[in-house]
Image (cartoon, rainbow, N blue to C red):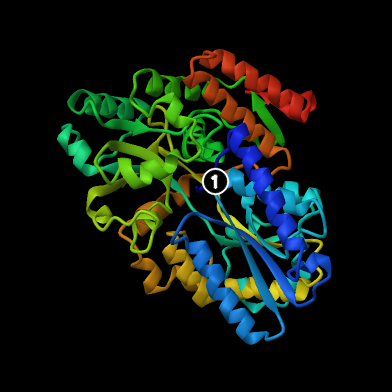
Amino acid sequence: MRGTRNTSVKSSLSLIAAGLLVLTGCSAGGGGGAGAGDDSTLRIVYQKSGEGSPLDTLMQDVKTQFEAGNENVTVQLEPVEGSDEDYATRLALSQRSPDTAPDVFYEDTFKVRSDVDAGYLLNLDPYLEEWPDWERFNDGAKAAGVADDGATYAVPLGTDTRVIWYNKNVLEAAGVEVPWAPKTWDDILAAARQIKESQPDVVPFNMYAGTGTGEGTVMQSFYELLYGTDSQLYNEDQQKWVVGSQGFVDSLAFLKTLYDEELALTPAQALDPNIWQAVFGEYLPEDRMGGVVEGSYSPSFWQEGGMFEWAEYGDVMGVAPFPTQNGQEPGAVSMSGGWTLAIGANSQNPDLAFEFLTTAMNQENLLKYTVDNSQIAVRSDIADDPTYLESNPFVADVSEVVDVTHYRPATSDYPEISTAAQQATEAVITGERTPEEAAADYDAAVRDIVGADNVVEE
């Protein structure tokens, strides 16, 4: 899901075992990989989110096209089913050895710099200079693939934003005015309490929390809160991580209120890595949830051919920007991320790998993927295409918040910082720590991760 999720120890161990089995299978027999010296095989590793996965459809289409144009080349697709953390673990396993490293792989934007530092990604600058289509990509999206050395190591598939997705039926039954446009955090709580009072079997307003939903916890929940305060996660001017933040405490306190008052899912449900599937596939379509903070990609699950087809979603669902804490400027907040395609630094066929990547990224293929996955376009000739502009009822709404969006700090130590923030939310919703105690634990963790010289108190 979309932003991402840490797994339990049990699921991680199962995944590692499965990953090793897959890797063994790839190395044995006639398959081999580019890293194993097979000049006619390209190995492509990517995430598959159930049946009807737009990315899987893209890769299957490109495999057919590529093999038709390169008769001596075999494209070996290796989809990984599961959460973002499942995928990250599987990818990390494959990258540990040149014999198992993929030629082309799906890469989360926030992992680019850390994976470049680890030596996993190929510098694409020499190839991009010769690719005319590169000029059609949005400059902001391009930046997601740039590392500390200024070189580009990944090409964006699309980008996204986060908004409140609300069920009109639930809100109207509770007497909440639709279209709904909360201006403060208190407005959200007021509506949620109103829903709880009128419909006790409905989850009023869900925000993810805990390590179970991994990156989804911060991208679809905690950062919406934090960046809506007068605090921030990282001071870009000083290039230091922020500690001692009142906004951090306030954000944890808001989550505590949601969970303590039973306005969100239960803590046990929140820790389930796959709870997002129930949100998209059951709670919202069955009028059992008032609202949730989720991504601009949400319609991809409900569209025809999506994971949870729901013909009425365009009529039942509504969208609202997530408000700042007290309605202060700019009034709303969003988070943006996105995914890329990258080429393995150990690929024995970098030219073929880049040809595969650009085939996936051509206008026709990327337009279909952008529409099917409800992405925000990164190519100018897609952003202006009528097929894209008419692809779902919410394209304009989710695009408007680009003006107030934020991006995760693209530093190599960010993944550890993110985990510390997720742990803080989990400690609060389970009652193990107060917001103040959990924030102090986070501050200590940040100092341990980056060093005392790389933090600033705000």
Image coordinates of residue 204 in percent, x first then y, are 29, 31
Mark 1, residues whose alpha carbon is within 10 Å: few (<14), some, or many (≥20)? many
Residue 122 vs 264, above or below: the answer is: below
Image coordinates of residue 218 in percent, x first then y, are 53, 36
Image coordinates of residue 362 in percent, x first then y, are 56, 75
Write the residue at 68% across / 44% down: 16
Can residue 110 be seen by looking at this rendering? Answer: no
Write the residue at 37% across / 33% down: 206
Write the residue at 26% across / 55% down: 314
> Which quarter of the image is occupied by the C terminus?
top right
Write the residue at 70% across / 80% down: 73
Residue 391 found in image quarter: bottom left
- Amino acid beneath label 1: Ser
Can residue 186 be seen by looking at this rendering? Answer: yes
Residue 447 found in image quarter: top right
As helix, strand or loop, the secondary structure at mark 1 comes to loop
The answer to which of 255 and 7 lies nearer the viewer is 7
Q: Which residue is the extreme one toward the front?
A: 29
The total number of labels drawn is: 1
Residue 276 vs 347, above or below: the answer is: above
Q: Is 291 on the left-hand or right-hand side of 369?
A: left
Residue 446 found in image quarter: top right
Name the residue tied to disc 1. 83
Image coordinates of residue 108 in percent, x first then y, are 62, 51
Q: Is 175 on the left-hand or right-hand side of 263?
A: left
